[in-house]
Amino acid sequence: MGGKVTLGVLAAAILAFAGVDYATLPPPLPSYAQTRAAWHPSESWLYDRHGRLIDSARVDFAARRLAWTPLDAVSPVTRETIVAAEDRRFYGHGGVDSLALLGALRDRIRGRRHRGASTLSMQLAGFLAPDLAAPGARGWWDKLRQMRAGWAIERGWRKDEILEAYLNLAGFRGEAQGIGAAALGLFGKTPGSLARDDAVLLAALLPEPQAPAPRVARRACSLSGAKDCARFPGAAASMLGPARSLALDPGLAPHLSQRLLLRAGMRVTTTLDARVQQAAIVALKRQLQGLGGSRARDGAVVVVDNASGDVLAYVGGIGGNSTAAAVDGANSYRQAGSTLKPFLYAQAIERGYLTPASILDDSPVQLDTASGLYVPQNYDHAFKGPVSARSALAGSLNVPAVRTLLLVGVEPFRDRLWDSGYRGLTEDGQYYGFSLALGSAEVTLLEQADAYRALANGGQWTPLRLTADAPRPAARRITSAQAAWLVSDMIADPDARAATFGMDSALRLPFWAAVKTGTSKAMRDNWCIGYSDRYTVGVWVGNLEGDPMRAVSGTSGAAPVWRDLMLALHGARAGQAPPRPEGIEQRLVSFGDGIERARPEYFLAGTGQSQIAAAPAAARRPRIVNPVSGSVYALDPDIPIERQRLAIGVSGAVSAHRLMLDAKNLGAADAHPLVLAGPGKHRLRLIDLTGRVIDQVIFTIR
């Protein structure tokens, strides 16, 4: 009978033990290697070409975590202080501190406030299996599960691995998780530079991460054992004050960070050079501060190495007075203005339509388009008359550029721009029309820098590189080497641009550099793009919200930034003029009628001329230039009718010709009559001595 009772008791004990074992069984816990592999920081980091950290970006917003911090990267005093505060017998137990448990039990029986008995191993188990430390999990059954989890960790982990994981997984304040985020967010330091008082404050924060500063200060005083704790209240308040940046980087490329850092934990090595990036920021900031927010609020800068295509500086904006600081000005589409003209002239020269010495007529012109008359104007609303192509391009004259586009054709020019990397030109040539010569298309600063770099490289184009691992495709020829060299020589000529910009503008450097400015319609964008033999620098100044700038010109907006950077980049070695390629000849050219001074000029081989003159009137085809066929004019009832006469304009040798308006003889064509035509459609004819109609236009009066 006694044996049966004993067996029954034993069976009951076994069943009870099995029940307790099952009830207190902790969940499966990962190994140290698995824990490290599963760690994903909330940040990503951007480095320059030399491995220097230049920026970072937060990508994961669930918690604030930096990179995993190795134990040897934490200051010894921090390790020692936290171990002493949280688990002073850490190195002597196997996961559970029996003495601490007995002390806690004694204090509980006596009704005293007791110190927690959870070891670092048990707390780490709670980090790895959150249900072990869930709210309300403070009963004895829960404590037994935590103890068993602590023993399990100690069996598979080394002590230094346990401490390292604890320091990385512990929550210190708010969303900051881990010693790395705590050190930077609370003290603005790295974990390795934390001092004793810093470590004491962190240890005081661990039991209650959201505790107010006075309570943290009292705990810190107790942990430090100091007799004089006057320093802790202020230190705790400072630590828990406004959050510091969780980044040691200088924040040099925030827009590029947003573009490249797409996943948490990314470490991207860019082609940027931190020194060049800093110089670009300083130059742009100085200029925008000088202009003031009422004139222009935003700007962007790109610096490119010509040989490699590596982007050395990428400044999407500097904030300041900006009302759209988050917008990336370096990669935003803006109207190009006159910056597309070099590619137009290069195409005309390449095809043999023009030479740098060719004469273009800078005089009023009206072009009939599907949407109405197109009447290009120069920047200063004045006209220079006959000018050479060199002077027209360097001086950024608009009417000669439109006349050049008439030679090249809108569609071929649009295709050339597309081949040069301007991927914003998604419509056909007809969509842009003749205004494409003056930069009506939208482009980005990156596209501008790469297209101009192709001219610097003799007409060969490759895409720009922003990261160290970007491919290096073979160069693709866009423009002939001869045309690229000639256009480079034209926009590098300070004498040719003097009539427009003066002899001592910001575009003139003490060494060779080719440069072009541009201003878009209504003064919304101002560009300056130029290159030396080694670097291409592109600058944009404007307002990202699209409102016009005030009192900002091509040489007062972007050009000073371009000049400052060019001088800085070439401080050790001045820019050198590119060698003249084969297929270029030089002639001493004189211009008839004093159009321009005699000078040495360059030509494609076989096209050189020694004397250049504008075609005389007798050599031009007689035609009507005003009004343009298809024009529609509206009579204004508020203006006296006699003051609304229409000026008739003709060109060519018309001395023996007469004009007919409908059935009315207007007399000699060269008399430039003023006519008053009534409402309706009218036909204007140019008639020679034999009565033959040489030209005619139809216009409408409303």
Image: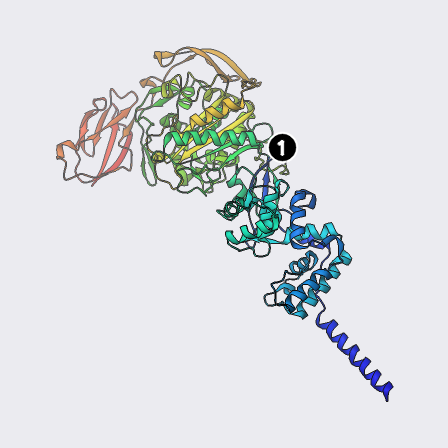
The image position of residue 7, as x and y in percent, is 84, 83
What is the quadrant of residue 198 in the picture? top right
Viewer-nearest residue: 431 or 295: 295
**Residue 262 versus residue 512 in the image, above or below:** below
Q: Amino acid at mark 1?
A: His
**Residue 163 versus residue 694 in the image, above or below:** below
The image position of residue 335, as x and y in percent, is 41, 37
**Residue 436 versus residue 164 in the image, above or below:** above
Left or right of 564: which side holds 435? left
- Label 1: few (<14), some (14–19) or many (≥20) C-alpha neighbours in 10 Å: few
> Would residue 41 be seen by someone viewing this image from the given angle?
no
Left or right of 91: which side holds 553? left
Which residue is painted at 26% across and 24% down in the image?
Answer: 688
Left or right of 526: which side holds 514? right
**Quarter containing the N terminus:** bottom right
> Would residue 528 be seen by someone viewing this image from the given angle?
yes
Q: Which residue is mark 1?
A: 50
**Residue 697 versus residue 621 in the image, above or below:** below
Viewer-nearest residue: 296 or 402: 296
Which residue is painted at 72% across and 51% down in the image?
Answer: 161
Q: Secondary structure at mark 1?
A: loop
The image position of residue 156, as x and y in percent, is 77, 57
What is the quadrant of residue 305 in the picture? top right
Q: Give the number of callouts.
A: 1
